[in-house]
Amino acid sequence: METILSISNLNKRFGPLHAVKNVSLEIKKGNVYGLLGPNGSGKSTTLGIILNVVNKTSGDYAWFGGKLETHEALKKVGAIIERPNFYPYMTAEENLRLVCKIKGTPYSKVTEKLELVGLYDRRNSKFRTFSLGMKQRLAIASALLNDPEILILDEPTNGLDPQGIHQIRDIIKQIAAQGTTILLASHLLDEVEKVCSHVMVLRKGEVLYSGAVDGMSSKQGFFELQSDDLQRLVTVLQQHRSVEKTQLENGKVLVYLKAPLEAHELNRWLFEQQIVLSHLNFRRNSLEEQFLEITKTLA
Amino acid sequence: MKRLLAIELQKAWKNKASRVLTISYFVLLSFLALIASIKFDVLGIQIRIADQGIFNFPYIWHFNTWLADWAKLFLAIVVVSMVSNEYSYGTLKQNLIDGLSKKEFLQSKFLTVIVFSLVSTVFVFALSLVLGLCFSSYNEPGIIFSDLDYLIAYFVKHVCFFSFCIFLAILVKRSAFALGFLFIWWVFEGMLQHLILPKIIGSTEVSARIVDFFPLESMANLIKEPITKFQAYKAIENQVNAGAAPKDYSVHWYEISVVVIWTVFFFITSFKLLQKRDL
């Protein structure tokens, strides 16, 4: 698969603060990547570096195999960083035409993309009259003007109301469905879970996890059990060879596994040990729990 | 180059404040023509300025470029806000993300400034030509087109001044502060020449020569004040001050080169600043 962006051992220091530590990653064509991390984890700084607005301290990155200079490569990229930045005194259409001039895209794209984000009727309104949701949609239209090879979105739903969030998500899904590579930075995990195929988790500038979304959750399936005598349940469970550890939470025993175990096998085994369960549930961690788990254990 | 200019001109022209200021600037320049109609009384004799020879070729080139020069402060506001707005709107960042390089960004600003200066120079040239043809006592082509180096000086001076504005705007990122800084710098050069350096060196002559190499003073030196060169004035002065060494009013290549060097310095330093900073 074609590599769109590769980053190797990227570092950024702001004085004593080491904002990005040895980040390496590879973006392949056609995938939808989620970049996860709490506020201040270095997501925006990393994006800033590859987008030519922040200077790296050390390390390397290469767009499209390094054949193009960064600013030339960026003409094939669409990106929105944090908040929509446009000229307030220009109309939506004029702003997009200016972007066309910068990217070298024909003006005919302007109408097409304004229609895509549902702003065509407001094309002659000045940017400053737009609501935040409309500004964000205009930013998406602008990022899509050149039919980019990759779309980079940094917190695209930040500060939007539920309708606005929904609209933006629909647009992202629509774009993803067309096969555009997307890199979506967010701290809203369900957002990432809904649209991404791959995730990278960043904390304090370090990559904690990088891989498929499924890979992140399937490893971590667990059982939720309840019975009359929880203490006995726990002692018995610890004798089972597939059980890694148990944990008492809200009157339930959570059982984490080190080897695959089917629910009916566990149930039968416990019954043989004279334990009758009143509750048995096999669960996978949501991405959010996963994320909290990963960022906590490596603290 | 056409692309960079088109980008920048769209940014400037769509902005109402910039548009109004630019138009006022050219209207103000046209007021040069109104001097022709000024009349006043001196010792009971009616004097019409236009008849006094200020519109004579080639003196008119000197006089008009010197007078028109003051109006550049209007364009300075446009130039400063053209740069600082990019910071306050966050559009500098967006432009870079969209695929403009930092160098291209700066080039587009400098090209615009060169175009502004060129248009202004052509405007003053045309206006002076018309005024001169109407009022000048000499109309031989050889005289009309002599001393045109004042127009070259005018152009170079404007490019340098606006480059200074761009540099300041990039340095402090706020238009009001940049203009304030420009004013403070002007005061600073004045103090250096008249108060500080004479104290240190002890010679006003030497300190004036040193300050000649500072940006604003070197620009001012390009077109010296023409009032004392003016015939009527000269006649009076000659009687009072006979025998004094005649003042040199012409434009010199070394003065132009100092200004050109400053322009290059402003461009390169602005670029370095842009490159070094994270946005």
Image (cartoon, rainbow, N blue to C red):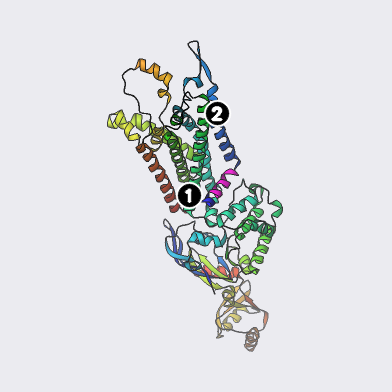
Taking the spot 40% from the left edge, 45% from the top edge, the residue there is B264
Mark 1, residue position:
B107
| Amino acid tagged 1 | Gln
- Look at the image and say whether residue B267 sits in the magenta stretch: no
Q: Quadrant of residue A279?
A: bottom right
Mark 2, residue position:
B31
Pinpoint residue B33: horizontal percent, then vertical percent: 54, 27
Q: Quadrant of residue B243?
A: top left
Which is nearer the N-term, disc 2 or disc 1? 2
Quick one: A281 or B13, which is closer to the camera?
B13
Mark 1: secondary structure: helix
A215 shown above or below B167: below
Q: CA distance from mark 2 to mark 1?
A: 32 Å
Pinpoint residue B68: horizontal percent, then vertical percent: 49, 31
Taking the spot 62% from the left edge, 53% from the top edge, the residue there is A96
Quick one: A173 or B221, which is closer to the camera?
B221
Span highlighted in magenta in the image: B5-14
- Look at the image and say whether residue B12 sits in the magenta stretch: yes
